[in-house]
Amino acid sequence: MNTFVNGLWNRFVQLVANEETWVTIGMISFQVIFIIILAGLVVRLLKSIIRNVFKVRSRAPLRFSERRELTLLKLLENVVAYVIYFIAILTVLSALTIDVRGLIAGAGILGLAVGFGAQNLVRDIITGFFIIFEDQFSVGDVVRIGQAEGNVEEIGLRTTKIKSWTGELHIIPNGNITEVTNFSIHNSVAVVDISIAYEEDLNRAEKVILELLDSLEGKYEDIIMKPELLGIQTLAASDVVMRVTAETAPMRHWYIARMLRKEIKNHFDKYGIEIPFPRMVMYSRQEEAENTAERQAMKRTESE
């Protein structure tokens, strides 16, 4: 046993003391570092070229929509990074004197076996391809997928990333996307309900609102068509509700609705039109009993 250990130690000492061993390690380390740095530079260069191509493409008379170009740009950048880094890994393995051809052949056989168990991954990739190919939604769109709603940050071949209004980032496998609601394709509609007191003249209130809507034409860029007064929406317990709608640019209806409420409130104040407020009625049982007794006494007197 001691002889075996001594033999291993002697071999280790000879290996460490051998000058060629350190030269080989230095050359391999240099090659690995050079390959990694070169791969990073190539990825940056190719991404820069892709961005410049899309900038030139944006000035062409025939072009994709901006949202589709942004989606394709991010997808191409991801594909370039995957391909370059995969080639870099194979080159590093080759520099470490590992038989890459045998590894690739073994990986092919192993991949065939794993493929049967990776059906979800294949489904994610196929679904991601059709999402991009059919332009169902793009980067920058506001969508609702299941319980997630927000801006599309990134679309990959395997996952889609959605950032909600409060900052959460939802990462959804493409294979799980069965239904999508896209809010960014068509124009939106801002809906504003206006409460008016029953004591006010409704005809006068309608004229004031129409006058305001006429003055808003061209004031806000996000308003596509002049706002329209639809009329009385409901007769509530303490107010009359009138509805105003305005067609806006996609996803700008919330902003325009807020601006319309502000404009209407200021215009109503200018003409002295009252917006109803909660009223409280005090009821006294003692006074009611006294009033009832007085009415009964009056009835008896009249009957006599």
Image (tube, helix red, strand yellow):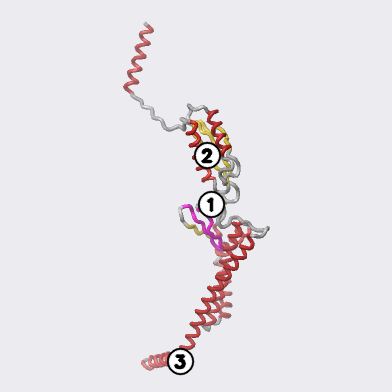
Q: Are marks 1 and 3 in contact (CB under 8 Å)?
A: no
> Which of disc 3 and disc 1 is earlier in sequence?
3
Q: Is residue 156 magenta?
A: yes
Residue underneath mark 3? 19
- Three-letter code, disc 1: Arg
- Three-letter code, disc 2: Val
Question: Taking 300 as reference, is 191 above or below it?
Answer: below
Q: In front: 186, or 199? A: 199
Query: Mark 1: few, some, or many residues within 10 Å (few <14, many ≥20)?
Result: some
Residue at 47%, 33% (x, y): give it.
Answer: 275
Query: Of the numbered discs in the image, which one, if any, rests on residue 144?
Result: 1
Residue underneath mark 2? 192
- Three-letter code, disc 3: Glu
* Residue 50 x, y percent position in the rendering: 60, 66
> Which of disc 2 and disc 1 is earlier in sequence?
1
Residue at 54%, 74% (x, y): give it.
Answer: 39
Q: In front: 184, or 169? A: 184
Residue 248, quarter of picture = top right
